[in-house]
Amino acid sequence: MDSSSFLMQFAQQLINGVSLGSIYALIALGYTMVYGTIKLINFAHGDVYMVGAYIGFFATTVLGLGFLPALLLAMVGAGILGMFIERAAYRPLRNAPKIAVLITAIGVSLFLEYGSMLLVTPQPRTFPAVLSSTPIHIGGLIINSQQVLILGVSLFLMVVLTYVVNYTKLGKAMRAVSFDTDTARLMGIDVDKVISYTFAVGSALAAAAGVLVGVYYNSIDPLMGIMPGLKAFVAAVLGGIGVIPGAMLGGVLMGVIEALVSGFISSTFRDAAAFGILIIILLFKPAGLLGKNIREKV
């Protein structure tokens, strides 16, 4: 392979990786928001992403909605589901040992997976072609119009989230609860409501990612959330879990690395590369790329 062909293939894989990474970033944002607020790793988050994809599927096939209304309906439905999960499964264990909450999160994940199998059967469903796929040629590169849509929707949602967190009353309350829950409560902030809204926002972003994946890959199934959920968790750790810009950066980097491994080595090793990154980050920079090590005096 000559240098020009290599550079062209590298650029193509880079484009594919950024598109995939924006999906991981949307899911990782849910992990990092929940962890940043109550220090909980919500391992059911990947399955909320799956539920969002199914809501979008039924919105397009049964209700006959277009892409945008289906996306909004999926986000609202998953947001309500996230609030219900927090209220029913996590809030009663707010003061319980961390291991109990972690086991509960795994239990909720399994409940969503096998409950979905019971309701919609384990068979994969073909997501309807609600958007046309038009190749866009830029020099020797080929960009799919759906990739542009995925990246555009993801960037828009990230910008909206950044605005909400930094410039709204809810965002200020989220940051206050994240910094010190007890002090926030003493200052009159309804901590339970803020945590519930945090789950809703994170779940809505995951649902958006689920619909975008369904549109792009045209296939969904009840176990589709396992691997993307784990990779998004790795992305959150890579960027610095609890740090919103870190989740965005980690997601994009994860997608790019996965695409480069698939394009230049083998698609067989792309999952191994993701978890290899997790090991390296935990060994050399456990706080993540944008995270900060915080020392506590005891």
Image: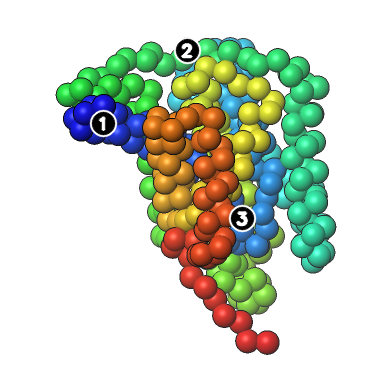
Which residue is at 79% across, 59% downward? 99
Residue at the far bottom in the pictured view: 298
Of 63 and 260, which appears nearest the observer? 260
Return the residue at label 1: 6
The x, y position of residue 22, in whole percent, is 43, 39
The part of the image, by quadrant, that contains residue 114 is: top right
Is disc 3 surrounded by few (<14), some (14 to 19) or many (20+) residues within 10 Å?
Answer: many
Disc 2/disc 1 C-alpha distance (Å): 33 Å
Type of the residue with mark 2:
Ala
x 77%, y 62%: residue: 98
Q: Earlier in the sequence, mark 1 or mark 3?
A: 1
Where residue 185 appears, as percent x and y from the top left, is 66, 72
Residue type, numbered disc 3: Val
Disc 3, SS: helix
Q: Quadrant of residue 229?
A: top right
Q: Which mark's residue is nearer the viewer, 1 or 3?
A: 1
| Rendered image: mark on residue 34 | 3
Among the two numbered marks 2 and 3 on one chain, the one whose residue lies closer to the N terminus = 3
The one nearer the camera, 8 or 122, is 8
**What amino acid type should be assigned to the residue bearing mark 1?**
Phe
Q: Is residue 9 above or below residue 96?
A: above
In the image, residue 93 sits, relative to residue 294, either above or below, namely above
**How far is disc 1 from disc 3 in space, using C-alphas?**
41 Å
Q: Which mark is residue 129?
A: 2
User: Pointers 2 and 3 in contact (CB under 8 A)?
Assistant: no
**Who's the residue at 47% across and 12% down the image?**
129
